[in-house]
Amino acid sequence: MNEIVIFPSRWKTALAFLGCVGFVALGCFLIASSSGRLDDLFMSLIGGVAILFFGSIGLYIGYRLIRPSPALRINEDGIYDNASLSGVGLIRWEEIAEIFVYSVVGQKTLGIVPLDWPALLARQPRYKQALMNANAGVAGAPINIPQAILPMPIEELQEKILSYHATRLDQTKP
């Protein structure tokens, strides 16, 4: 089978970037409108957290807009996941236990569960380990590919991956 390369949707990526800019602006407004009272200090804290969180994500998304790279590569080796900040890189076909579509707060996502989660996690830098552990706790799958960045329906991607997975596993049987 040929390699499948999927780039993130530029339009959806640009909208996500603008959303981050909006939340950073809101954080700046919360800090600027603080008068020093205790409840205003709490709002300043929320503003600061919003600036740090959405600013970090916005920088990553902005980088991805300037220097586009594939979100996914699907080939004979496995799936190379670079779909998000917590992308795991290469996960080999024989390392995959389950692939399923789920929804969290109305957002469709493709979840991938590895056979040996601790081994896959150990290959990641610490910041990705933290993100992946958080994802696994919320979503039920440590590897997540959001519909929001894809240029195709998530179910279509799932079909392609499952077909490739079945073919590769059949080829490796003795």
Image (cartoon, rainbow, N blue to C red):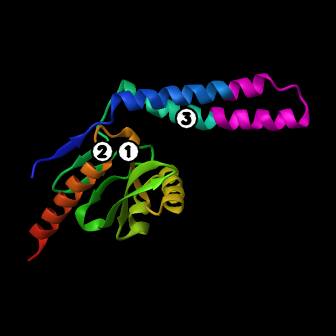
Q: Of 158 and 50, which appears nearest the observer? A: 158
Residue 67 drawn at (x, y percent): 34, 27
For label 3, the residue is 56
Percent across and percent down for residue 54 are 58, 34
Residue flagged by tag 2: what amino acid is it?
Pro
Q: Secondary structure at mark 1?
A: helix
Q: Quick one: SS at disc 3?
A: helix
* Dot in front, 2 or 3: 2
Q: Is residue 10 above or below residue 162?
A: above
Q: CA distance from mark 1 to mark 2?
A: 7 Å
Amino acid type of disc 1?
Gln
Q: What range of the chain is rendered magenta?
A: 27-51
Residue located beneath label 1 in the image: 147
**Earlier sequence position, callout 3 versus callout 1:** 3
- Which residue is at 15% across, 47% downward? 3
Please give the name of the residue rendered at 91% of the width and 32% of the height, measured from the top-left corner: 37
User: Would you name the residue on which mark 2 appears?
Assistant: 153
Image coordinates for residue 48, horizontal then vertical, percent: 71, 34
Instruction: Indicate which disc, 2 or 3, sits on the residue closer to the N terminus.
Output: 3
In terms of depth relative to the viewer, which is nearer, 172 or 8?
8
What's under tag 3, amino acid-wise?
Answer: Ser
Q: Secondary structure at mark 2?
A: loop
Q: Is residue 94 left or right of residue 126?
A: left
